[in-house]
Amino acid sequence: MKRKNLLFFVLAAVLNTAAIAAEAKDWTHVKVGIEGAFPPWNMMDSSGKLAGFDVDLINDLCARAKVECELTPGEWTAMIPSLNAGKFDLVTLGINEKRRQVVDFTVPYASGVASFILLKDGPVASLPMTGQKLNLNDKSKADPVMAKIGEALDGKTVGVVQSTSQEQLINAYYGSNVTVRAYKNSGERDLDLKAGRIDAGFDSGVYATSILAKSGNDELMMSGPLIKGAMLATEVALGMRKGEADLKAKFDEAIKSAAKDGTIKKLSEHWSKIDLTPSFETN
């Protein structure tokens, strides 16, 4: 019986090793999911192709990692489910603790902020600390400022993109005092803001800078501090399924290389006029 048991365990170990080997991936081809509706990070150009900072940088990172990448647009709210279902191998995501529970991340490839967007002559007065950086983790400094913002927004309607960290923040800080309206994408929210159907928007500061530079948005303005910290996913990275250590290592190395040689700075300034090069302090 002992010999039979030993034979059984040896056979099981061999089969398990074979199964692991069969599942191992050499990562010569990687499927990348991108929203395609969040300029200047990503968008569809006039010919229907993906364009933007994310697209240019990911193509560069794939070349550095020596993998062929297939970039595919996808619904924002379906990004993480599609990733974990195997439709994508990587997706572009801001890092926060809630997302860390369900996906792994590379080191960040961009470091941004979040900002309020208002109508210049709208119902919300200019907010405090406009254009100044505010880290919510520095609570002694941030809490009084966020309280003043809450007073200005009291009873108002704030538009956010659904399933984003910006939506989480507005609900966490002001959910009991404002009406939070969630949209499928930033463009739909901006149309309602300009039409007066909502009173304020809250979004990526890079996105806000981009739309304010475009014609037709003269009535809009950024207001209040440039915010990061707390639940905000302002550090942007590539998300992957849990346990894909080899894939993470490939792209961690590529991102650090692109930061070191100035590629991230060059591409981010081209698309947003802002240097988004990360410091890697979050990973």
Image (cartoon, rainbow, N blue to C red):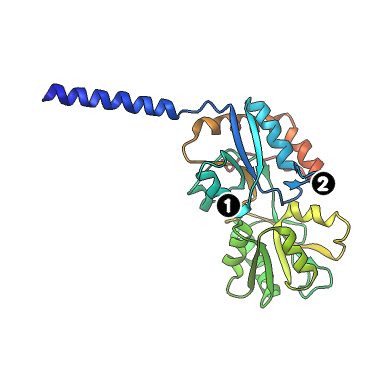
Residue 132: x %, y % from top left: 75, 57
Amino acid at the residue labelled 2: Ser
Q: Splitting the image into 4 quarters, where does residue 205 fall?
A: bottom right
- One can see residue 51 in this view: no
Disc 1: which residue: 78
Camera-side residue: 108 or 28?
28
The numbered dot on residue 46 is 2
Camera-side residue: 137 or 97?
97
Secondary structure of the residue carrying tag 1 is helix
Residue 230: x %, y % from top left: 58, 56
Q: Residue at x 55, y 30 (%)?
A: 249
Query: In the image, is 75 to the left or to the right of 213?
Result: left
Q: Residue at x 73, y 72 (%)?
A: 199
In the rendered image, the quadrant that contains the N terminus is: top left
Question: Could you classify mark 2 by the number of other residues whose Cα lies within 10 Å: few (under 14), some (14-19), or many (20 or more)?
Answer: few
- One can see residue 126 in this view: yes
Residue 155: x %, y % from top left: 66, 78
Camera-side residue: 24 or 125?
24
The numbered dot on residue 236 is none
Amino acid at the residue labelled 1: Ala
Q: Are marks 2 and 1 in contact (CB under 8 Å)?
A: no
